[in-house]
Every structure is written in structure tokens, then in C-alpha cells.
Image (cartoon, helix red, strand yellow):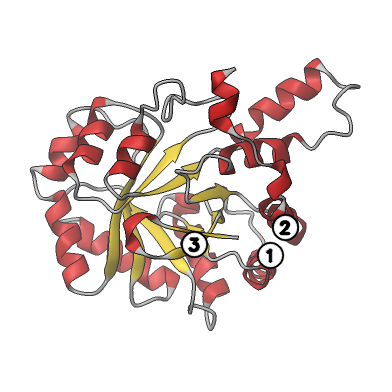
Amino acid sequence: RYRTLGATGLRVSEVGYGGGRVRGDADPAAITHMLHHAFDLGLNYIDTAPSYGGGLSETLIGRAIEGRRHGLVIATKTKSRDPNEIPAEVEGSLKRLGVDAIDVLQFHGGYIPGDDAPAILDEGGIDAYRRLRDEGKVRYLGFSTDGPSAGAERLVASGVFDVIQVHYSLMYQSTHDMFGDTGLIPSADALGMGVVLMRCTTSGVFPRLMRRSFPTELADIDIDAFLLNYALSNALVDCALMSLASEADATWTNAVSDDVDGRMDLRALHRG
């Protein structure tokens, strides 16, 4: 199943691949087979960063997408905000990924403090991104953030970004408070930004908590599917990233994406 990534017009699979868990012990052949299987099932959004595995994530994704670039949406990041360093970072990503252009380039943020926004908006960071876009090396501009902060709120309000990647899940709803319809997600959506989720299955925390608390009662319940369906039930979400580790994982995420009966009316839930 597909959704439109904000005002970019890009049609993206509602479940994407997040390459953040690729480390030095990764099996290159297994990752290629897994991604090819995911592509065959329709997944087309891939997110990575130079810092993931010290560049290994980008390198292995680059091998997997060779000959299959058409129709894929490739997103990566830059750690630097310095306009003199950003071009070299992007050139490194282009080389590792084996592509001529990056579809979504994002400032890599965790918690974005208030003094980080000026480095991006006022001191040349965003200008470097725009130049790369003008050169055809980047198509759309974005940033990632773990949650709300003065810095993240200013980046959204600036109106210069096309995409936000943000933390949101059943356990972490501060980025979209349904009671007041406030937060980074509705603010970004109102400006036409695409919304991509990270950690929508709580990085395993909620499933572990529930299985330890109710080992017998939940033995036959797919808690991860419940959590992914919860995230996908938010109509403002365009894509939810999952850290796939196997072909079975890719098959599972595709099945959850197709499970429209598992979706929920979140507004009704919050009304009580």
C-alpha cells in the first residue's frame, strides 16, 4: 500500500526500510536478498545515514539497489550543519549508495536544541542543501528528530523543508497529541511536509514489557503488528520505517500493510 509523501508528490510504500541497525557483522548477501524480496513485495522507501555502521549501511544498500534504482525513494542524512562540510558528506553518500542523486537529504538530528536551528537556518546549512538540490544531487530536503524541541519546532515553522522524520508510537505521542491535535506531526503536515516515522514499534520496549507482564495472556498476540497498525492508523503519516533483518521480516511488514482491518480510528479512541 502506498501514500503520498507530503507535497513532494512521491508515492511511497507506507512501510519503509530503516537501515540504522546495519553493523559490522552484517551479512551483505542476506541484506541484498532481504531488500530484493522487499522490493518485489512493493517496498520502495529506504532510509539510511553515513553514521549507520560507519558507512556500511549505505554501502550495502548501494549494492542491493544496483540495477533496481528505478521507483525507489532513497533518503539519507548529513551529520554536519557546516556548509563547508556538507558537500563532501553528500559526495561520500552518493558514492557509497552508487546513485547520481539522493531523493531526500536530511539533517541528522536526535534531540534538536534551540541553538541547533540557527546553524541550519541562519549559518549556511540549509543554503548548502539548496545548492546541492540546484546541482541535481538532491531532490528534497528534510530533517530527522527524536521529538519536540525548540529547535525542531523552528525547523518545521521555517517552511523550507519537504520531509520530517520523527519518533511516534503508541508509547510516544508527544509528536502528535490527538486530544489537542498538536505537535510536530500536524504542524509539519499543515505545511505540506511529508511525515516519516521512526521507532513506531517502540524499538521493542512495549512488546517486551507486555510479554513480561502478561506472558500467558499475550502468547498468541502479534504485538508488533498491533503497534505498526496503530502508527499506520494516523492519517498524517506517510511512511513508517522498520528495521528489517530477514526476508521473513519483509513478508511480515507487507502483510501488516495489507491488513487494513487492523487499523484503528485514533480520534474515536481519544474521544473515549
Residue that mark 3 sits on: 12
Label 1 residue SS: helix
Label 2 residue SS: loop
Task: Identify which amino acid the numbered label 1 is placed on.
Answer: Met
Circle 2/circle 1 CB separation < 8 Å: yes
Q: CA distance from mark 3 to mark 2?
A: 21 Å
Residue that mark 2 sits on: 246
Q: Earlier in the sequence, mark 2 or mark 1?
A: 1
Q: Nearer the viewer, mark 3 or mark 1?
A: 3
| Rendered location of residue 111, percent (x, y) | 34, 30
The quadrant in which the C terminus is found is top right
Residue that mark 1 sits on: 34
Asked whether 72 or 189 is in front, the reply is: 189
Task: Identify which amino acid the numbered label 2 is placed on.
Answer: Ser
Q: Is residue 178 left or right of residue 84?
A: right
| Rendered location of residue 47, percent (x, y) | 47, 56
Q: Earlier in the sequence, mark 3 or mark 2?
A: 3
The quarter of the picture where residue 165 lies is top left
Name the residue rendered at 43%, 70% in the picture: 97
Q: CA distance from mark 2 to mark 1?
A: 5 Å
Q: Is residue 87 left or right of residue 104?
A: left
Viewer can see residue 56 = no
Q: Is residue 263 above or below residue 161?
A: above
